[in-house]
Image (tube, rainbow, N blue to C red):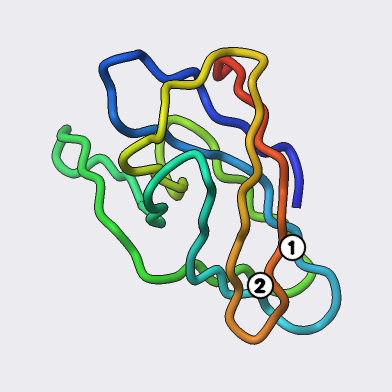
């Protein structure tokens, strides 16, 4: 797991997003089923898509990452982690811990850097 980042949160917006790389070594896929952080009340896995020119975002229950691959969650579409009800706004150069919950694997803690998306 690496490259975990979140864009700064505007003061009046109660949610944020986290992007990161999920790498799976070995022969067994990894299934991300949830996440948690002290920075927000809850975290959901979301998938963002364009449907007929309209952006849609929906909650998904899990992301399966095939063995021997890396899945990169990035702004602009696809999977991301949605932080709901932020405890407080966070600014560029802040950081916070995030725990990734995997089915049939140990939880993984990463440090999320707050930085502008490039």
The quadrant where residue 61 appears? bottom left
The residue at which mark 2 appears reads as 66
Mark 1 element type: loop
| In this view, 50 is above or below 91 | below
Residue at coordinates 56% horizontally, 44% vertically from top-left? 73
Q: Position of residue 112 (x, y in %)?
A: 65, 36
Does 41 sit left or right of 30 as displayed? left
| In this view, 103 is above or below 73 | below
Confirm or deny contact between disc 2 and disc 1 (CB under 8 A). yes
Residue at coordinates 42% horizontally, 30% vertically from top-left? 76
The quadrant where residue 71 appears? bottom right
Does 25 sit left or right of 103 as displayed? right
The residue at which mark 1 appears reads as 69
Residue at coordinates 40% horizontally, 42% vertically from top-left? 83
Does 80 sit left or right of 15 as displayed? right
Q: Quadrant of the C terminus?
A: top right
> Mark 1 Cα within 10 Å, few/some/many (few <14, many 20+)?
some
Q: Position of residue 6 (x, y in %)?
A: 55, 29
């Amino acid at each position: 797991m690496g490259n975990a980042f979140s864009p700064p949160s505007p003061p009046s917006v109660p949610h944020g997003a986290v992007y990161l790389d999920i790498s799976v070594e070995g022969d067994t896929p990894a299934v991300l089923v949830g996440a948690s952080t002290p920075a927000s009340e809850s975290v959901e896995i979301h998938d963002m898509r364009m449907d007929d020119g309209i952006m849609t975002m929906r909650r998904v229950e899990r992301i399966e990452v095939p063995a021997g691959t890396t899945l990169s969650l990035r702004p602009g579409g696809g999977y991301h982690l949605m932080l709901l009800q932020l405890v407080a706004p966070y600014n560029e150069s802040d950081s916070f811990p995030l725990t990734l919950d995997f089915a049939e694997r140990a939880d993984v803690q990463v440090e999320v850097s707050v930085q502008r998306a490039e």
